[in-house]
Image (tube, helix red, strand yellow):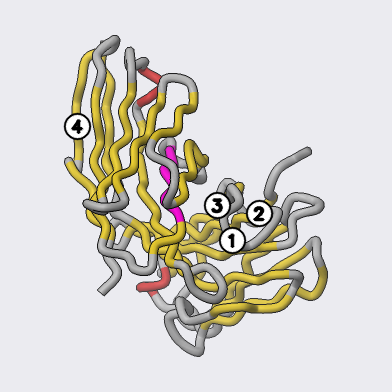
């Protein structure tokens, strides 16, 4: 299995532009998580899905952020409009079930907003 | 307030030595505690997951302990190797609908030869 796949690996954009991050979870995993990591705040859970349904989006910083999971093999995290403070590494992770299962992380997308 | 505190913030040890990383939490109600290893530039990798009833769990040279009474966990690394140089993150899950995860800031371990 290829593991969790994220694209792009690096993204540099200008303030105000729309950014779309993509994730393909491990086949057979029913839960998907989006995280953000910065030096200042560490790792933060943004939103998670179970069986393609968003369960908790309380970690999404503001309305500029949105996430979708149209099917079991694909999810997107969109930032519109982007701001410099959104610069971070965004990770996607998946697990077989929601509760106590091991989460497998993707390699992350390093986002830089100028 | 649900919090996870890790110590030390950073640690430097010589190759072959043992070390112990600490995690204190105030998460309630408690569901499980996880330790992750994160190499520079990579995503975190799960080392152990422990529920309330588990006191110790090992994964090779990594041994995690959990004291649910004092709300403390430790990660012990035996006979450290250069490849152990990484950030170690403690994550506590609250027992509620869905899965509320509270993250520590991590301990950065550097193993030198």
Asked whether residue A40 is in view, the answer is no
Q: Give yes or no for contact between labels 2 and 1 (Cβ–Cβ under 8 Å).
A: no
Residue occupied by mark 4: B11
Q: Name the chain letter of the residue that bears numbered label 3.
A: A
Does A65 sit left or right of A75 as displayed? left
Residue B2 has which mark? Answer: none
Residue A95 has which mark? Answer: 2
Look at discs 4 and 2 and give the one toward the viewer: 2
Give the x, y percent position of residue B68.
31, 51
Q: Name the chain letter of the residue that bears numbered label 2.
A: A
The kind of secondary structure element at disc 4 is strand
Q: Are marks 2 and 1 on the same chain?
A: yes
Q: CA distance from mark 3 to mark 1?
A: 22 Å
Q: Are marks 3 and 4 on the same chain?
A: no
Tell me: residue B41, above or below residue A69.
above
Query: Does the magenta-highlighted stretch encompass residue A55?
Result: no
Q: CA distance from mark 4 to mark 2?
A: 31 Å
Q: Name the chain letter of the residue that bears numbered label 4.
A: B
Q: Main secondary structure of the magenta part?
A: strand
Between B90 and A18, the one lying in front of the other is B90
Q: Which residues are magenta?
A: B32-38
């Amino acid at each position: 299995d290829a593991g969790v796949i994220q694209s792009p690996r690096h993204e540099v954009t200008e303030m105000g532009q729309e950014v779309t991050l993509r994730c393909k979870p491990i086949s057979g995993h029913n839960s998907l998580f989006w995280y953000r990591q910065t030096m200042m705040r560490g790792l933060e859970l943004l939103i998670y899905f179970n069986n393609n349904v968003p369960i908790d989006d309380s970690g999404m910083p503001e309305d500029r952020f949105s996430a979708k999971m149209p099917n079991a093999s694909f999810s997107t995290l969109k930032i519109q409009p982007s701001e410099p403070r959104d610069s971070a590494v965004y990770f996607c992770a998946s697990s077989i079930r929601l509760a106590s299962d091991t989460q497998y992380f993707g390699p992350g997308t390093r986002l830089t907003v100028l | 307030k649900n919090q996870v505190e890790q110590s030390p913030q950073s640690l430097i040890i010589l190759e072959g030595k043992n070390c112990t990383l600490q995690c204190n939490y105030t998460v309630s109600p408690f569901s499980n505690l996880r330790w992750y290893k994160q190499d520079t530039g990579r995503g975190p990798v799960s080392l152990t997951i422990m529920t309330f009833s588990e006191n110790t769990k090992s994964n090779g040279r990594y041994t995690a302990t959990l004291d649910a009474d004092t709300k403390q966990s430790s990660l012990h690394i035996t006979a450290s190797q250069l490849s152990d140089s990484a950030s170690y993150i403690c994550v506590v899950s609250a027992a509620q609908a869905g899965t509320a995860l509270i993250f520590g800031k991590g301990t950065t371990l550097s193993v030198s030869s």
